[in-house]
Amino acid sequence: QVQLVESGGGSVQPGGSLRLSCAASRGIFSDRSMGWYRQAPGKQRELVASISSGDNTYYVDAVKGRFTISRDNAKNTVWLQMNTLNPEDTAVYYCNAVYAWQRLNWGQGTQVTVSS
């Protein structure tokens, strides 16, 4: 069973930056559009950024211009560079496939807390 492991979260002040990483236990990314999702307390999990197998990217309006998603299939890794963080970005962040039929078991996620 392929495992997804997210890392790189932490506590930062508003305006700060973090880089999240998502590693798979074996190569599964190359043929999948991968996304970063987040779930804030009391809210549903939402897709915030995605990258296709052809490196086309999508961002939800709330993070556009501040977040950058990238991937390296050879390293089985997807990253999310997050800049100019604000308290509304506070959530647990997860990675997974974009399309439901390609989705894997959800990992533990990584907590991002933005607070002064």
Image (cartoon, rainbow, N blue to C red):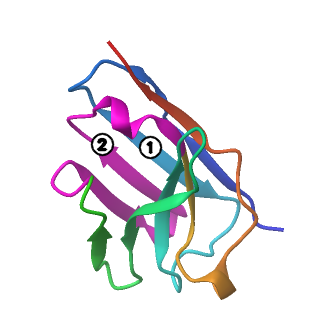
Mark number, residue 110: none
Q: Residue furthest front?
A: 42
At x 34%, y 62%, the residue is 70
* x then y, percent, for residue 30: 51, 80
Asked whether 17 or 55 is in front, the reply is 17
Secondary structure state at the residue bearing disc 2: strand
Q: Which residues are magenta?
A: 63-92
Q: Which residue is mark 2?
A: 82
**Side (left or right) of 81 relative to 109:** left
The residue at 39%/80% (across/down) is 52
Relative depth, front residue between 17 and 86: 86
User: Picture coordinates of residue 93 (x, y %)?
Assistant: 53, 46
Asked whether disc 2 touches disc 1, contact meaning CB atoms under 8 Å apart, the reply is yes
Task: Sort mark 2 into few (<14), some (14-19) or many (20+) by Cα contacts within 10 Å.
Answer: some
* Mark positioned earlier in the residue sequence (2 or 1): 1
Please, which residue is most extreme toward the top here? 116
Mark 1 residue type = Leu
Nearer to the camera, 50 or 88: 88
Q: Give the quarter of the image for residue 110.
A: top right
Q: Position of residue 19 (x, y in %)?
A: 37, 40
State how far apart marks 2 and 1 are (Cα): 8 Å
Residue 95 vertical placement versus 54 (above, below): above
Q: Quadrant of residue 101?
A: bottom right
Q: Which residue matches tag 1?
A: 20
